Image (cartoon, rainbow, N blue to C red):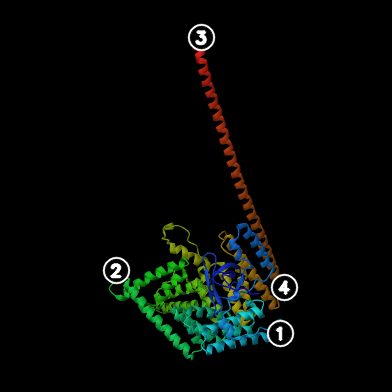
Amino acid sequence: MAASLRVGSRVLACREPEEEEEEWEECQVVGVDVESMMVSLRFDGGFVAHHVPLSRVRMLAAGGGEREEKGEKEREREGEKDQARNEEEEPRIVELPVDDGYSATIKLPTPPSAEEMAADSEAKYRYVAEYKAVGNTLFKEGKYAWAIRTYTEAVDRLARNCYSSRERMLWDYFARVPCAQCYSNAALCALKLSDYTHAETLCEHAMECRPEDGDLIKVLLRHGQALLGQHEYERALPLLERAADREPNNRAVREELLRAKKAIKEKAKAADAQIFANIDLHKSGLTSRRAAAEEGAKERLEKGFDRLLDGNDATSLAIFEPLLASKLCAGVEGAGVRLQAAYGAGVAHYHLGRHDEAARRLDLFLEAKQALENEGKELPMPLMGLPLVLFYAAHAAYSTGALTRARSFLLSYLNEAKALGPQQVLNMPDGWGGKKITAADRKASRFRNRACSNEALADGHTMLALIHERIDGPAAALEDAKEAAKLADLGGEPGSATAHAESRVDSQRLAARESLSKLLSVLGDAAGAEEQAAEVQCIQEEMQAKAAQKAQEEVKKVEEAQQDDADAEEDEALKIEADGCDGDSKGAVMDRNAMDKEGAAEDAPMARAEGA
């Protein structure tokens, strides 16, 4: 039995639904979109999630809203009951209030029963196809809001009625394809309504379904159009370029790509004007506009890298991207600025998880590096170093399926990192050993240290082994798999690892040995596979022992803290008791003095009488 939903309702949802281990949290509905069947949710701390599908929202146990008017103890008792009910019963999916116009007009297909699906494996695919057909009809009639609702509801209903979870549905290729098409079509409807933010979200949902071929081109195009509508030209460009690379004769893609490039060019002119506006030629003593612009670019690059080193990736992109689009980065003369701006933009995009954009920017960095080397000019290498950006370029290429390029980057990274050797973290104060050490030097040294560490080298060999196995077969992957296991055993620098870092190293050792054992088994080396399996068991036992020791230490800390609190309470009680005793003693002395004075007063008349 479904419950109604309205603004202000308390529900259960996940902040990050893409995570493998979802954690359902209580939150409040702050927006309801009846047409698209999506809601906006506010979590504790003020975080707001927009465009959340109904399949990712669950109702609280019955009676949750009635407790607000009851006493604290009664609310606690009912909260315990609700928790018990939530553990016993599957949380119910939320349904929006009935839209009479939509429900009265649109005839939707009936989901297949469990018996029907058991008898006919194609029943669920026909169900989503029929749902999609209804959306197509609404689109042709120009009823875009209703079409969005139908398309998104088709995916949600399929997941709810035919699969145990949304994730299970997305593992099914024959379900994934129509789901991607539904989200893509819904995005087109949102574009028709000029709702670009919603269109972007729908395209992201479509990409979760891993579309292919023509479906992928449509999603990339519509995603690019959604970003262009929000004036996010730099983000739209790589999506449209990717679509153009796959389908160069697609007229719509070419037109939108040209539009994006034109907008970026105009933005670059504005960026150039801003750079010149910030330079006082008379004050700086510069004699040419080019020199003035280069000085301004240098200042902006420094500011961008400061933001990047502080972890403000999005803010740094707002500096690097306009520089890349400016005339200062054009040609051989602009190779130095282009190299640094592309480096910073690539690293920032990588940190934000935008591997497509990161790959393009890092390719631009390497092109600028090659241009400077061909001219015999000095490379203005950023403080974070070359190995880091080569590793990022390799992983970004690997994530986007460009395995050959990823392999090339990895070989360059491993050669560069091993040639440089371990890198020191600069924790010493400025002036140590007569060297000037800035805050930026200290922050950048941590990136250099990580990029040349045994952990990073092990990751590099692991990735290289996976690529060799996919391209050339298991035998080609063996040497890199062995090297990865060897480096993982070395771990971090002695005495420098924190407890968290030690746990990460152990996990890497375990994964490397497990991968090597499986690879040897595939190659028919039973003895080698058994030896690695024994190593895996030893590492697991070590990790379990460390976990048990850590748990004991935590218990000991708690006990010591409790003992410290008890000792403090006892000391306080003794102090209070001592203060009370001192007060009694002082009172007794005062009483005795008073008695002596009274006695003396009584004796005085007698003494005078005797004297007389």
Q: Name the residue under label 2.
A: 284
* First of labels 2, 4 by sequence position: 2
Amino acid type, callout 1 = Glu
Q: How far apart are marks 4 and 1 (CA)?
A: 49 Å
Residue 519: image location, x then y, percent = 66, 76
Choose top left, top right, bottom left or bottom right for residue 337. Answer: bottom left
Q: Distance between the residues labelled 2 and 4?
A: 73 Å
* First of labels 4, 3 by sequence position: 4
Residue 551: image location, x then y, percent = 65, 57
* First of labels 1, 2 by sequence position: 1
Question: Would you place residue 557 above or below residue 37 in this image?
Answer: above
Q: How crowded is mark 3: few (under 14 residues within 10 Å), some or many (20 or more)?
A: few
Q: Name the residue under label 1.
A: 116
Question: Would you place residue 111 above or below residue 378 in this image?
Answer: below
Q: Distance between the residues labelled 1 and 2?
A: 80 Å
* First of labels 3, 2 by sequence position: 2
Say which mark, if any, is on residue 610: 3
Amino acid type, callout 3 = Glu
Q: How far apart are marks 4 and 3 (CA)?
A: 123 Å
Residue 408 in view, yes or no? no
Tell which of 593 and 549 is nearer to you: 593
Q: Are marks 2 and 4 in contact (CB under 8 Å)?
A: no
Say which mark, if any, is on residue 527: 4
Residue occupying image coordinates x 65% and y 64%: 83
